[in-house]
Amino acid sequence: MNAIRVNPQVRDALDRRLPIVALESTILAHGMPYPRNLETALAVEADVRERGAVPATIAVLDGQICIGLSDAQLERVATAKDMLKLSRADLAYAIASGRDGATTVAATMFCADRAGIAVFATGGIGGVHRGVVQSMDVSADLTELARTPVLVVCAGAKAILDLPKTLEALETLGVAVAVYRSDEFPAFWSRRSGLRAPLRFDDPRSIAEAFRAARELAMDGGMVVANPISVEAEIPSEFMAGIVEDAIADAEHEGIRGKQLTPWLLDRIFQRTQGRSLEANIVLVRDNARLAAEIAKELL
């Protein structure tokens, strides 16, 4: 069974040792409404190309892991009504059953590593959910970061999470967490979380050198590079705090849990901010893709 299909442009880049940036497809399938999701996916890929790297959006289509999607495939993912949300644990099921699925951070990291891609750009990583003592809801993104050697550029962890516990969990798992040009860990839509940056880097070359050193030491796991959203696009944490708390309370009242929780919360926050959260999300994803491309070039 040939479980992985690599797009010809990505295959050529791998063969020629060109910089490549992996991109997830859950944002496309479950994180944004159509047609903004497709517009954003095309813009993000264009951003990567403009910075001199090759984009490789990852999804499972007809039971095959696709490393790099055509424009037609991007539209297929963006418009599908029954696209599975795939974490690492779900990949084998999707392959065996011939299903279509969009990859989360954990699944995208796994697939990127199997294809030989070391840099991945996303919006925000998953982490420890609020109320974890009762729910035991901890994202598989954290354990994937602890075992898969992929550098993940993000805007921090999603602000719906327990950010202090997420950082503690990453430290316990031995995952290097750095913030780009800031001493404070960002909170996704917001530049400030009140949490000190574990590490700080001020240029892509230094990030690449640190990641290269970890690989030369054969250290397990990846690296998180948190890229704060731009000042112009951010939504201050003081404004978002109450909206996030209300959305979480609504989810608990309606019994929303598991894989449905994050997209449900993001949609509720989109409604409460009158679409402002979506606009910020688009900006930060594009910023992260540009930074990831710069890092990927320095890794060669």
Image (tube, helix red, strand yellow):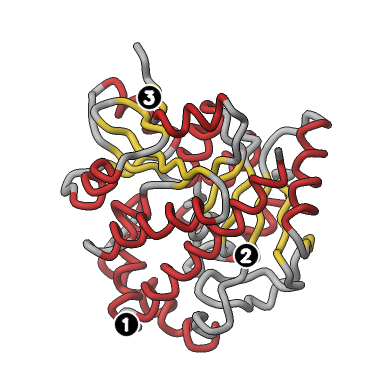
Q: Residues within 10 Å of mark 2 (few under 14, many from 20)?
A: many
Dots 3, 1 in contact, CB < 8 A: no
Residue labelled with disc 1: 272
* Position of 148 relative to 275 (above/below): above
What residue would you read off at disc 2?
Answer: 227
Work out whether mark 3 precedes mark 1 in sequence or the reverse, and give the earlier one. Answer: 3
Image spot of residue 162 (x, y percent):
56, 65
Q: Nearer the viewer, mark 2 or mark 3?
A: 3
Asked whether the residues under the numbered discs 2 and 3 touch, taking CB atoms below 8 Å apart as contact, a structural biologist would say no
Compute the Cα span from label 1 to label 2.
25 Å
Position of 79 with respect to 204 (left or right) is left
Q: Which comes sooner in the sequence, label 1 or label 2?
A: 2
Residue depicted at 53% across the width and 46% down the height: 141
**Where is the N terminus found, in terms of image quarters?**
top left
Q: Looking at the picture, does residue 211 appear above or below residue 268?
A: above
Which residue corresponds to the image point at 18% horizontal and 47% vertical from the top-left?
Answer: 80
Q: Which of the numbered marks, if any, corresponds to residue 5?
A: 3
Q: Residue 130: tell me if it is visible.
A: no
Residue 17 in which image quadrant: top right
Q: Give the x, y percent position of residue 235.
A: 49, 83
Q: Secondary structure at mark 3?
A: strand
Element on which disc 2 rests = loop
The residue lying at 35 percent from left, 55 percent from top is: 42
Name the amino acid, label 2: Asn
